[in-house]
Amino acid sequence: MIPTNLLPENVKWCIAGGYAACPALAGDVDIWVMAEGPIFDAYAQIVTHLQQTFDDERLVISPRPDMSHDRSVHELYVDDVTIEVAQLYTDGRNFHIMVTYNATPEAIIQRFDISTHQVAVTSTGRVVLGPQWTPPHVMPTIIRHTGDRTAKRYEKICHRYGHQTVLA
């Protein structure tokens, strides 16, 4: 699923979204690391591991956010705080690594905006489907609106899976 050296040992993670829905059509792989302690400790552990494992040309580390200023810009898809850690190109794929605190795969996908991507695959291979999940061959639905971003994502996802966009 992911390169064996991509993350430090003993971190809990899942792949959620487009790659979990249909790897053949996904543009990247979104990896969600589920921190069990302080989120910035997990961020630092992953960054250190990535810097020691991969060369600079393939790795883009996201700046460590200062959560004391504006937490809202760092909340992606889930109720718990989530921050982007890095993007990495390796093994012919783009990997997008995020860390979230005190979450489960179920909690992560529960907050997704488009039904087709409400799916996760855990590090053990367990597939987790959200309550409003639809398979790629079925027309997706908008689960929750996140402003203009949802409409653009909906069009992109419809196109990816061969559906005509129908926005109500």
Image (cartoon, grey):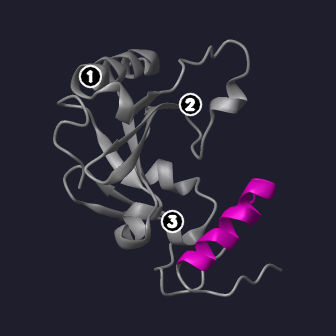
Q: Residues within 10 Å of mark 2 (few under 14, many from 20)?
A: some
Give the mark nearer the N terminus: 1 vs 3. Answer: 1
Res. 115 in view: yes
Name the residue that disc number 1 marks: 49
Locate residue 44, reporting x and y percent.
38, 16
Q: Tell me the residue at 44%/39% (across/down).
A: 103
Magenta run includes residue 163: no
Residue 5 vertical placement versus 50 (above, below) = below
| Stretch in magenta | 142-160
- Between the C-alphas of marks 3 and 2, the distance is 20 Å
Indicate which label's residue lies in the foreground, 1 or 2: 1
Indicate which label's residue lies in the foreground, 3 or 2: 3
Q: Quadrant of residue 163?
A: bottom right
Q: Residues within 10 Å of mark 1 (few under 14, many from 20)?
A: some
Q: Tell me the residue at 74%/55% (across/down).
A: 149
Q: Quadrant of residue 11?
A: top left
- Between the C-alphas of marks 1 and 2, the distance is 22 Å
Locate residue 108, reporting x and y percent.
49, 48
Q: Residues within 10 Å of mark 3 (few under 14, many from 20)?
A: many
